[in-house]
Image (spheres, rainbow, N blue to C red):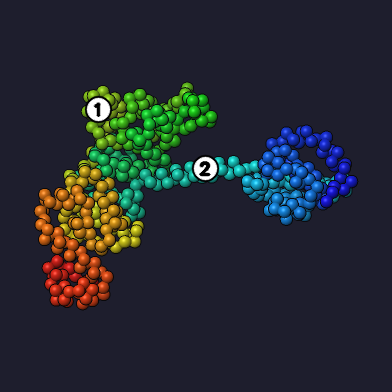
């Protein structure tokens, strides 16, 4: 459909403004009072990928039918006779845009044309999504590193006197903002102890940020901890970056593997602890900071001080209160209760019902656990998902447990065969509804099965 002659007045006006309109960053789309396209600017072409030759002179309804648009704000304005804004996806790349149609009235009050501005918000939507992801990650991190009392595997499970003394001391020191140094072998539970300190303090609703000083490359660690100003170094973000210490203001920071902190950064961290101020990389201004520092290490910091690898003044700043977490082999009374806890936890999580034989428990209680609580937790999860039988026997344990069994409680081939036989019987009893049916399933006499059950003290529920 061609443009009527009476529209020439409006076209003349637009031609006078065309050069100005072409400079607009927003796409501009103009239709007449009938909904026929009069004008499209360059920005609109770039946003949508449509050429003006495809659009000018055609009615919006026809363009919708041809698949150019899913809806037309121009037609909505003509119908409602007022300004209308809509969100829609438009163009060949389905970009997200805000389309705002504005009616232009003539002297009689009738709409002579509709001018629509189209703004590409695809990038804005992407930024919004990234922000939401960042917020979600922050929330997940805080949940991950917060002591839990809801039955999850982050609970502190113990019954040994040594752990009772540590927990009692934590209750004493948690309300105060003093620095705490947690020492102990890897996997002993230092992170969980740090969670508890934070949760029992008046900072529990503030950020709790964990930094692994040994996992972040040395050249990045300074900017991660202290942040940086705009243009501080090559590759720095234009807007600068807030550091983790500043991000934790009013809250708690756990500096894990503190013994790996490079000496130059030890000086800066000491300044933070002494002056309660932080200065970003490349910056000149300082910012007051209120954070509690919990540090953790599996190294002997005193030895590192003597070797010149760790600053003595920083050591004493961090070690206002020191808690030494004993390895699991030094608190064997905690093994069984931890074993039961992790079995219950993973059984609920994976909906698996299994049990551990007394022989297996005996081996686990006498194992030296070099990986401590973390190793125990991982072993339980592995056994629950990988062992096919209902009862976990010594033969189901990893080889290094079996080799230890050979030194602690020697077993002959006959004894090992008997363990396999016992497991087969237990599995068969689980699968069958009665002892007699189990005997038939195994292909043995009922009396033989009863004798074996009595020998192994197995009962049929």
In this rendered view, identify the residue nearer to me: 270 or 368.
368
Most foreground residue, 399 or 34? 399
Label 2, residues with CA under 10 Å away: few <14, some 14-19, many ≥20:
few
Residue shown at 30%/57% (left/top)? 385
Q: Is residue 108 left or right of residue 303?
A: right
Q: Residue 130: which numbered mark, if any? A: 2
Question: Can residue 111 be seen here?
Answer: no
393 relative to 182, above or below: below
Q: CA distance from mark 2 to mark 1?
A: 42 Å
Whether residue 348 sits left or right of residue 14 in the image: it is left
The quadrant in which residue 457 appears is bottom left
Q: Quadrant of the C terminus?
A: bottom left
Find numbered disc 2 in the image and state the secondary structure of the residue it sits on: helix
In the figure, residue 120 lies in which quadrant?
A: top right
Picture quarter containing residue 18? top right
Reading the image, the residue beneath label 1 is: 304
Crowding near the residue tagged with mark 1, few <14, some 14–19, many ≥20 C-alpha atoms within 10 Å = some
- Specify whether residue 153 is in view: yes
The percent coordinates of residue 288 (x first, y second) are 44, 29
Residue 79, above or below 185 = below
State the count of labels.
2
């Amino acid at each position: 459909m061609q443009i009527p002659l009476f529209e020439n007045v409006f076209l003349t006006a637009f031609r006078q403004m065309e050069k100005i309109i072409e400079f607009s960053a927003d796409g501009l789309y103009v239709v007449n009072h009938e909904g026929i396209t009069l004008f499209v600017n360059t920005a609109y072409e770039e946003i949508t990928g449509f050429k003006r030759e495809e659009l000018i002179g055609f009615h919006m309804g026809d363009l919708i039918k041809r698949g150019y648009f899913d809806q037309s704000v121009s037609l909505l304005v003509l119908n409602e006779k007022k300004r209308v804004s809509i969100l829609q996806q438009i163009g060949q790349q389905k970009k997200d845009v805000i389309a705002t149609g504005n009616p232009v009235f003539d002297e009689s009050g009738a709409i002579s044309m509709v001018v629509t501005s189209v703004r590409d918000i695809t990038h804005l939507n992407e930024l919004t999504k990234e922000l939401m992801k960042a917020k979600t990650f922050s929330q997940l991190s805080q949940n991950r590193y917060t002591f839990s009392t809801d039955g999850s595997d982050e609970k502190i499970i113990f019954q040994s006197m040594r752990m009772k003394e540590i927990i009692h001391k934590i209750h004493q020191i948690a309300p105060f903002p003093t620095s705490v140094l947690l020492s102990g072998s890897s996997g002993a539970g230092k992170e969980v102890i740090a969670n508890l300190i934070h949760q029992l303090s008046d900072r529990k609703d503030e950020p709790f940020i964990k930094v692994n000083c040994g996992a972040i490359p040395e050249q990045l660690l300074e900017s991660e901890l202290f942040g940086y100003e705009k243009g501080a170094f090559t590759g720095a973000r234009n807007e600068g970056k807030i550091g983790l210490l500043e991000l934790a203001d009013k809250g708690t920071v756990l500096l894990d593997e503190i013994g790996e902190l490079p000496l130059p950064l030890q000086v800066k961290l000491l300044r933070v602890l002494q002056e309660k101020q932080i200065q970003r990389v490349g910056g000149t201004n300082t910012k007051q900071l209120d954070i509690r520092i919990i540090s953790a290490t599996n190294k002997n910091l005193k030895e590192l001080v003597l070797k010149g690898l760790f600053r003595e003044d920083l050591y004493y700043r961090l070690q206002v209160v020191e808690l030494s977490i004993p390895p699991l082999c030094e608190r064997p009374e905690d093994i069984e209760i931890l074993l039961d806890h992790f079995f219950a936890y993973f059984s609920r999580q994976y909906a698996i019902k299994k049990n551990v034989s007394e022989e297996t428990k005996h081996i686990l209680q006498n194992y030296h656990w070099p990986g401590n609580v973390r190793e125990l937790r991982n072993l339980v999860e592995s056994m629950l998902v990988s062992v096919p039988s209902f009862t976990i026997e010594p033969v189901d344990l990893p080889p290094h447990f079996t080799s230890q069994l050979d030194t602690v409680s020697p077993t002959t081939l006959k004894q090992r065969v008997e363990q396999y036989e016992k497991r087969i019987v237990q599995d068969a009893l689980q699968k069958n509804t009665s002892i007699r049916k189990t005997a038939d399933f195994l292909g043995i006499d009922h009396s033989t099965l009863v004798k074996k059950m009595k020998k192994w003290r197995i009962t049929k529920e």
